[in-house]
Amino acid sequence: MNEFGRKYFEKVLYIRFDQNEQMRQLFERSSHDMKELLLLLQAAARFKITPGNTLIILDEIQECPAALTSLKYFCEDLPEYHVMAAGSLLGVHQHRGTGFPVGKVNTLHLYPMSFPEFLDALGYGYDVEIIESGNWQNIKLFAERYTHLLKLYYYIGGMPEVVSTYIETQDFAEVRRVQNEILSNYANDFSKHVPASLAAKLSLLWDSVPEQLAKENRKFIFAEVQKNMRARDLEDAMDWLIRAGLVYRTPRINEAAIPISAYRDGAFKLYVSDVGLLGAKVGLDISVLVEKASVFREFKGALTEQYVQQQMRAECALEPHYWQSDTARAEIDFVIQQGMHVVPVEVKAETNTRAKSLMSYCRKYQPHVAVRCSMNDYHKQEIAHSEKSSTLLIDIPLYAVSQMAKECQSALRLDDIPMPALLPPIEKI
C-alpha cells in the first residue's frame, strides 16, 4: 500500500493502529465529525491532506473499530479523499454488523501470489508472457525450467513476505522460518480476536485440515477433528476460518448440471490458503526439491490439488466444486462451470495420467470438454461416445494451470457467443 501511495500520490499518511495509541484515541473521539478528524490528522501528519494527491492508509484497522466506522463517513462526507484500509480478516470480521461500513467501501480480495506472479517476482516475467501466449510449442521448449520453478513454488508458496525472503536470502531455512512465523501469527489471531471457547475450536479445525487432505478420500469429516465432535459443534469455527480467508471450501455436487452450485449435497473438501503454508504445516522437507518429482507426489498428491485449486481461484476467477459417483467409486477432483457447460478437471501429480474416474464421468455425462492437469505436455484428443457425441480432452501442464479458463473458453467457443440484445422497453398499461 505504501508503494502504491509513493507511485501514484504526492503524499502518503500512513497510520498503523496497533502501534499508535494516539491515533486510536483520535479516531475514537472524532470518527463521526469528519471535518474535525481531518484537522486532527493534518496536525498529526504536519502536512495538508488535499484531495487527489494524498493517500490516507489505515493499517491494522481491526485494532480500532472507530476507524472502521469512519470509512462510512469518509464515503458520505468526504468522498473526494482517497482512503485505503487493511487488517486481519479475523479481526475485521469480528466488527461486522456493528461498525463495518457495508456498501461504503470497495473491497479487493487479495490471494497469495499465483504461480505467474511468483515467476514475475523472481525475474521470469518473459516466461509468464510465453505461457500466456498459448503457443504450446514454444512453451514446451522451456518445460524443464518451468517444472523446476514449480517445485520452488510448491515449497515457497505465494505469501509475499515469504517470496521476498527467498529473493533476498536464497535460504530455504529462512523461508521455512518465515512461514512458521506466519502460521504462529494466525494462531495468535485466534486467541486475540475471538472468545476462548471458539479459539480452541479454531485451532483444532485449522490443525485438522492437513490430516484430512492426506486421506485417499479428501472429504472433510468433522468427527475426525476430535472424537465425538459433530458438525454443529464446529460450524461457527469453520465459518470464521472461511471468512478470514485461511481455508477454502470446495463443495461436492451429486449431478453435473447448471448451475453447479444448485447441486451441492453438503459434503466438501477444505484447502488452506497457500501451498507453501500447507507444506510448512506438515513439515515438508527441503529434500523434496532435490529429487526429480518427489514434491509433486508428496502428501499423496494433496499438494498438487492444493496448488491447482489455488491457481483456479486466483488466476482463473473460478469457484471449484468436486464430483463423486453415487457408489463413491469414481471421483473428479474438480468441476468448474464455464458458460452453460460443466467441465470436469482431473489432477495428476506426475506423468501417469490413467484416469478411470474421468473416463467414467465422461461416459455418464458426455461433456463437451474435459481437462486433465499433470506433468505431461499440452495435448488435445477427442474421446468418442457415439457417432454424434464426443468429449475434447485437454491435457494442460501443471505449470500452465493459469491458462485453464482460457483453454476451456476457446474449446467451447464461448467468446463467439453474441451478447443478447437488450429487451425492448415495456409499454405502459
Image (cartoon, rainbow, N blue to C red):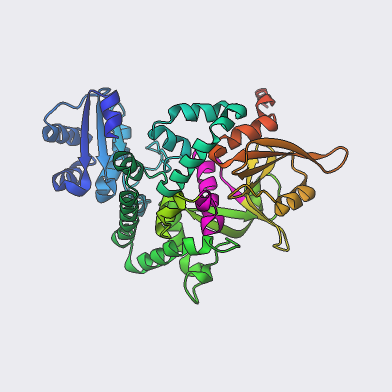
Q: Quadrant of residue 103?
A: top left
Q: Which residues are magenta?
A: 292-321
Q: Quadrant of residue 78?
A: top left
Q: Is residue 151 left or right of residue 89?
A: right
Residue nearest the observer in this picture, 385 or 35: 385
The percent position of residue 178, horizontal first and vertical second, equals 31, 51
Q: Is residue 104 above or below residue 174?
A: above
Residue 78 in sight in this render: no
The percent position of residue 134, horizontal first and vertical second, equals 59, 28
Residue nearest the observer in this picture, 3 or 84: 3
In the rendered image, residue 187 lying in the magenta stretch gets the answer no
Residue occupying image coordinates x 22% and y 30%: 12
Q: Main secondary structure of the magenta part?
A: helix
Q: Is residue 388 above or below residue 133?
A: below
| Tag count | 0
Residue occupying image coordinates x 46% and y 47%: 154
Q: Is residue 47 above or below residue 212?
A: above
The percent position of residue 307, horizontal first and vertical second, equals 51, 47
Residue nearest the observer in this picture, 173 or 20: 173
Which image quadrant: the C terminus?
top right
Residue, far bottom: 228
In the rendered image, residue 315 lying in the magenta stretch gets the answer yes
Residue occupying image coordinates x 53% and y 60%: 213
Residue nearest the observer in this picture, 128 or 337: 128
The percent position of residue 129, horizontal first and vertical second, equals 50, 26
Residue 421 in sight in this render: yes
Residue, far right: 387
Q: Is residue 366 left or right of residue 45?
A: right
